[in-house]
Image (cartoon, rainbow, N blue to C red):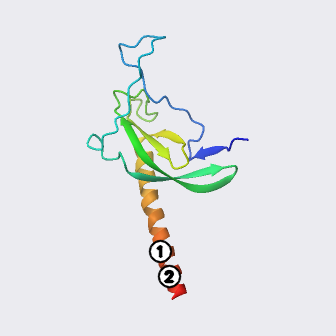
Amino acid sequence: TAAKRNYGWNAGRRRKRRKPEASEGAGTSEPLAEWITDPAQDHHIGKKIMREVTIDDESRPQPGIVYGWLSAKDSDFVDPQTGKAAPLWHVTYDDGDAEDLEEWEIEEAMSAHVSYVKRMRERQRRDQKRQS
């Protein structure tokens, strides 16, 4: 059976990733707006993240990376608090999963990665002291 995955507080909430360009009509094979993947276009692209994931009722950290970005103009996601179009960031996880996140979620996930790395380094230092 497939593992149940729950990424953070908004698990199961589906977001539209991208909207068709104005020239695209129903039933055409033209591509949807592409994720911007150039780090020069957005400072989050290429950054490592960490999100808490629940798989089969077991919670664990899941590392990933910010793959791309869509501006508010290209994204059809509407921020529920402001009612305005908002940008989205596409992340890919080390296990092959992916999801789209809002900016505050990206900031939170990048901060969680920094905290995770600090905890792992502290654990390594403690383990090295015990072995010495």
Which residue reaches farthest right? Answer: 1
Q: Is residue 75 left or right of residue 92?
A: left
Check disc 2: other Cα within 10 Å, few if <14, some if 14-19, many if 20+: few
| Quadrant of the drawing holding the N terminus | top right
Q: Position of residue 116 (x, y in %)?
A: 48, 63
> Going 47% across and 74% down the picture, which residue do you hit?
122
Q: Is 130 placed above or below 22 here?
A: below
Q: Position of residue 87 (x, y in %)?
A: 37, 35
On residue 128, the disc is: 2
Q: Mark 1 or mark 2: name the one nearer the start of the chain.
A: 1
> Going 46% across and 33% down the picture, which residue do you hit?
80
Mark nearest the camera among 1 and 2 is 2
Q: Is residue 25 left or right of residue 9?
A: left
Which residue reaches farthest left? Answer: 40
> Going 45% across and 12% down the picture, which residue do you hit?
28
On residue 122, the disc is: 1
On residue 70, the disc is: none
Disc 2 secondary structure class: helix
Which residue reaches farthest bottom? Answer: 132
Check disc 1: other Cα within 10 Å, few if <14, some if 14-19, many if 20+: few
Q: Is residue 71 left or right of residue 13?
A: left
Q: CA distance from mark 1 to mark 2?
A: 10 Å
Q: Position of residue 74 (x, y in %)?
A: 36, 27
Q: Position of residue 46 (x, y in %)?
A: 36, 48
Location of residue 40 (image quadrant): top left
Q: Is 60 placed above or below 124 here?
A: above
Which kind of residue does numbered mark 1 sit on?
Answer: Glu
Which kind of residue does numbered mark 2 sit on?
Answer: Gln
Assess whether mark 2 and mark 1 are in contact (beta carbons under 8 angstroms): no
Q: How many labels, in total? A: 2
